[in-house]
Amino acid sequence: ETGVTQTPRHLVMGMTNKKSLKCEQHLGHNAMYWYKQSAKKPLELMFVYNFKEQTENNSVPSRFSPECPNSSHLFLHLHTLQPEDSALYLCASSQDPTENTEAFFGQGTRLTVV
Amino acid sequence: QQQVKQSPQSLIVQKGGISIINCAYENTAFDYFPWYQQFPGKGPALLIAIRPDVSEKKEGRFTISFNKSAKQFSLHIMDSQPGDSATYFCAALKDTGRRALTFGSGTRLQVQP
């Protein structure tokens, strides 16, 4: 275990559903990230939170809505998704985003949009 | 525009052989270059990392070679083992501004017994 826990591990949702992905880190880190991993594509950064404040939104469609209530928890709220949004969504955390520190990843949520 | 280009996309190596994965970057603001290893059903995990002030870093069977002038870096896995079969991602991090990793597209390594 890396200290970053994601739930659920698998999720199937319809295009009209609303669901949320959860990430929790037990490492005392200050930065948290959402990445999207699609087949045969690089990991795509979606959002960055630094000390609970969103510092980057990488041109992500509004149907993805992040929430960071504290430095240990990160959510990704999903609504009216498209089939092309099916992917592995990875959460990561790091100690200090201003330094070159290791990013620890969770196991991801495999999302299928039907 | 892909800022970190990785090759090959897939690689098959015999047990005991050397696995070599290459990456190239364009942005000279990158100053930290990690390699991540990902097994099926798991998230990526840091394997080894290098900064541009050194040309090589070795940890066990894993070595990063870094060529700053060519803006290239590579991962060498010596004495490759079936347990090394995984997907490997190179990545880069800027010294200023955006403080999140930019990843290569990944290389799926299969080490045959």
Image: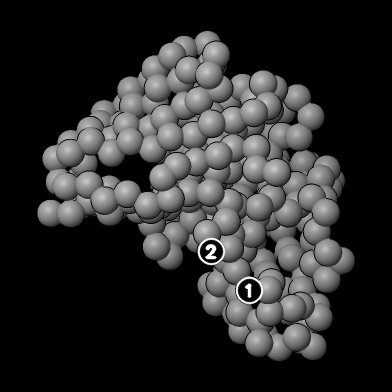
Seen from this angle, which residue lies furthest right?
A: A62
Secondary structure type for disc 2:
loop
Q: Nearer the viewer, residue A97 or A1?
A: A97
Q: Chain of mark 1?
A: A
Secondary structure type for disc 1:
loop
Identify the colour scheme used.
one colour
Residue at label 1?
Answer: A86
| Residue shown at 59% from the left, 37% from the top | B4
Q: Could you classify mark 2 by the number of other residues whose Cα lies within 10 Å: few (under 14), some (14-19), or many (20 or more)?
A: few
Q: Is residue A86 left or right of residue A16?
A: left
Q: From mark 2 to mark 1, how far is it between C-alphas? A: 10 Å
Q: Which label number is shown at residue A39?
A: 2
Q: Is residue B21 left or right of residue A20?
A: left
The image position of residue A31, as x and y in percent, is 70, 42
* B67 relative to B104, above or below: above
Contact, mark 2 vs mark 1 (Cβ under 8 Å): no
The image position of residue A19, as x and y in percent, is 73, 79
Earlier-in-chain disc, 2 versus 1: 2
Quadrant (top left, top right, bottom left, bottom right) of the N terminus of chain B: top right
The image position of residue B88, as x and y in percent, is 42, 46
| Residue shown at 60% from the left, 52% from the top | A43
For the residue marked with disc 1, what is the amino acid?
A: Ser
Q: Nearer the viewer, residue B21 or A92?
A: B21
Q: Is residue A40 left or right of residue A76?
A: left
Q: Quadrant of residue A21?
A: bottom right
Q: Could you classify mark 1 by the number of other residues whose Cα lies within 10 Å: few (under 14), some (14-19), or many (20 or more)?
A: many
* B30 relative to B90, above or below: above
Q: Chain of mark 2?
A: A
Residue B66 visible within the image: yes
Q: Nearer the viewer, residue B106 or B45?
A: B106
